[in-house]
Structure formats: C-alpha cells, structure tokens
C-alpha cells in the first residue's frame, strides 16, 4: 500500500501566508532603507547649502569692505586673513589684492574656507582704485533705525488690509 500524504487546503494557505509575510517584510525593509538613505542625503545637502549661503555672505562682506575703503588702502586698515567673527568661527578668510598699475583696476580675490569640512569658496573681481583725495562719505543714517517699530507698522498695515 502506498500512502500518500495529503495536505489539507488549510495547511497550504498557512504556508502561502507565511511566504507572503516574509516577502512583505523584505519589501518593507528595502523601502525603509531607501527612505532613510534619502533622508540622510537630504540633511547633508541642506547643511552644505547653509555653509554655501554663509560663505557667500562672508565673501560679500569682505568685498564690500574692500570697495568702501579702496583696494589701495585696505591692507593698511584691515587684516588680509584670519578667522571670521562670531557666530561664523568655523570659517576663515583670505584676501588677495593685486595692483593692475596706472589706470588698470585692482584684481581682488576673496577666499573663504570652512575649517571643519575643508570646503573653500573663491570669488575674484576687479575693483577700481579711489581717485583723488576726497574724504570717505558719512555712511551712517541721519537718525537711528527702529526696526521693531517698522515691523510693527508693517504687521498693522497687513492686518488692516
């Protein structure tokens, strides 16, 4: 006599359910891994964007100071390299000024470096020297600005509309 092992339909369903659960778990693990990987990458890109924004602002500040004081006098008035002021202590700057000669603008380069990440940004531009001996203009406002009052007035105007 040959005995055949018969499996009931119910035990087959249990086997398929177990396989479904295993496959579902694998797909869930793959999906979660992809989501976590994308999240970590987006955080890194966000932090890099913040560093680039700060570096651009620091470069703009240095170039504005060179423009205001004149490229000829700037090295006598300000440091040409060093750490940036708080809260940007993670950044260092270096300014290079090359004289172009008579009638030729100065070549000015500002290099800002993020110390911890070893990232560096450079901007080069041409700036004309100050002509004549005219004194520096007064750059302060005639009366102090009350920014809080300005914002309050803007909010009141927006709420009234």
Image (cartoon, rainbow, N blue to C red):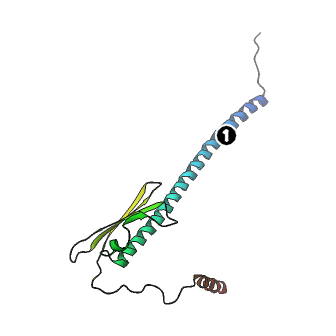
**Residue at x 43%, y 56% (from the top left corner):** 119
Residue 135, image quadrant: bottom left
Is residue 141 shown in magenta?
Answer: yes
Percent across and percent down for residue 64 are 39, 75
Residue 153 in the magenta stretch? The answer is: no
Side (left or right) of 46 relative to 26: left
Extreme-top residue of the structure: 1
Q: Which residue is mark 1?
A: 25
The stretch of residues the image draws in magenta is 139-145
User: Residue, x 28% and y 72% (percent of image)?
Assistant: 106
Quadrant where the image shows the C terminus = bottom right
Q: Position of residue 88 (x, y in %)?
A: 49, 64
Q: Where does residue 138 sit, x and y in percent of width and height? A: 42, 86
Along the viewing direction, whichever of 102 and 83 lies nearer the viewer: 83
Relative to 91, is 145 above or below?
below
Q: Residue furthest front?
A: 76
Q: Quadrant of the N terminus?
A: top right
Magenta residues: mostly which secondary structure? loop
Determine the residue positioned at 23% across, 71% down.
Answer: 100
- Depth order, front residue of 150/135: 135
Q: Residue furthest left?
A: 102
């Amino acid at each position: 006599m040959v005995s055949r092992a018969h499996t009931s339909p119910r035990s087959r369903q249990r086997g398929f359910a177990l396989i479904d659960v295993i496959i579902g778990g694998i797909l869930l693990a793959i999906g979660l891994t992809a989501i976590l990987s994308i999240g970590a990458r987006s955080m890194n890109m966000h932090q890099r964007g913040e560093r680039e924004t700060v570096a651009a602002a620091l470069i703009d500040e240095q170039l504005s100071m060179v423009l205001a004081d004149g490229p000829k006098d700037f090295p006598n008035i300000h440091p040409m390299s060093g750490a940036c002021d708080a809260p940007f202590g993670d950044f260092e700057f270096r300014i290079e000024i090359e004289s172009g000669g008579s009638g030729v603008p100065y070549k000015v380069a500002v290099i800002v470096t993020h110390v911890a990440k070893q990232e560096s940004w450079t901007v080069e531009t041409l700036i004309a020297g100050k002509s004549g001996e005219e004194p520096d203009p007064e750059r302060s406002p005639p009366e102090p600005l009350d920014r809080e009052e300005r914002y309050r007035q803007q909010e009141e105007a927006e709420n009234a509309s």
